[in-house]
Image (cartoon, rainbow, N blue to C red):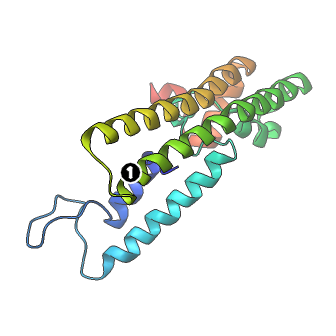
Amino acid sequence: MRAPGLALAALLLATGAAAQSPQGAEAPAGHRHAPGDAGEAHRRVDDYLKEFDAVVADGRGFGLAFAADQNGYPGPLHVLELKDHLQLTPEQEARMRALFETMLAEARPRAGRLAAAETRLRRLFADGVADDAAVRAAVADTEAARAELRLAHLSAHLRAHDVLTEAQRRTYQHLRWGGTLQEKR
């Protein structure tokens, strides 16, 4: 499942890895390779993608819910990691554990569908049978699978938000992102 996210975009820009350009053509900013650098940059991106695949296949999000997490909607795993700092009650902790287990149960099969869709898309090119219609269909299938997986993660963040108090959400925001919700809004 090769799903570029925000972190991948940052990695691509930081490493200079990107689209190939014809010899002698001026590449857009962020798309230039020094002679011999392209292989290393692409290996770093490939390593990142392998890590993404493994984490997502396990049911974890790897940035799929950043939009929620960064804006006051914590994820259950990170809440559990910070439970002592957040002073969770036993009931809150039990609810977070249940939310996390539910999220994993929803996310893992969806991650499998995304991985299969990504594999089918890559096979079109690897087998030399890619054409406009086949690629459009494969991309639509891949993005539908990605959307369902992302929704599993975002839904968990929505439910976790309601378990915490406003003070706990502010503390979480400070611990995870270094700011307050008021500063972000």
In this view of the protein, can residue 63 be seen by the observer? no
Say above or below: 67 vs 20: above
| Horizontal relation, residue 105 to residue 49: left or right | right
Please tell me which residue lies in front, 128 or 135. Answer: 128
How would you rate the neighbour count of disc 1 (Cα within 10 Å): few for under 14, some for 14-19, many for 20 or more?
some
Q: Is residue 126 left or right of residue 155?
A: left
> Which image quadrant: the C terminus?
top left
Q: Give the camera-side residue of 57 and 133.
A: 133
Residue sitting farthest toward the bottom: 36
> On screen, 181 above or below 56?
above
Q: Quadrant of residue 30?
A: bottom left
Residue at the image point whose x is 33% and y is 64% from the top: 17
Residue 182 position, x and y percent, is: 50, 25
Q: Residue at x 43, y 45 (%)?
A: 6
Disc 1 is placed on an element classified as helix
Amino acid at pointer 1:
Leu
Q: Residue 76 in the image: x percent, y percent?
A: 72, 33
Question: Residue 50, percent across and down?
Answer: 55, 60
Query: Residue 57 location, x and y as percent?
Result: 65, 47
- Residue identified by numbered label 1: 124
> Which residue extends farthest right?
90
Quick one: 176 or 38, which is closer to the camera? 38
Q: Say if residue 4 shows up in the picture.
A: yes
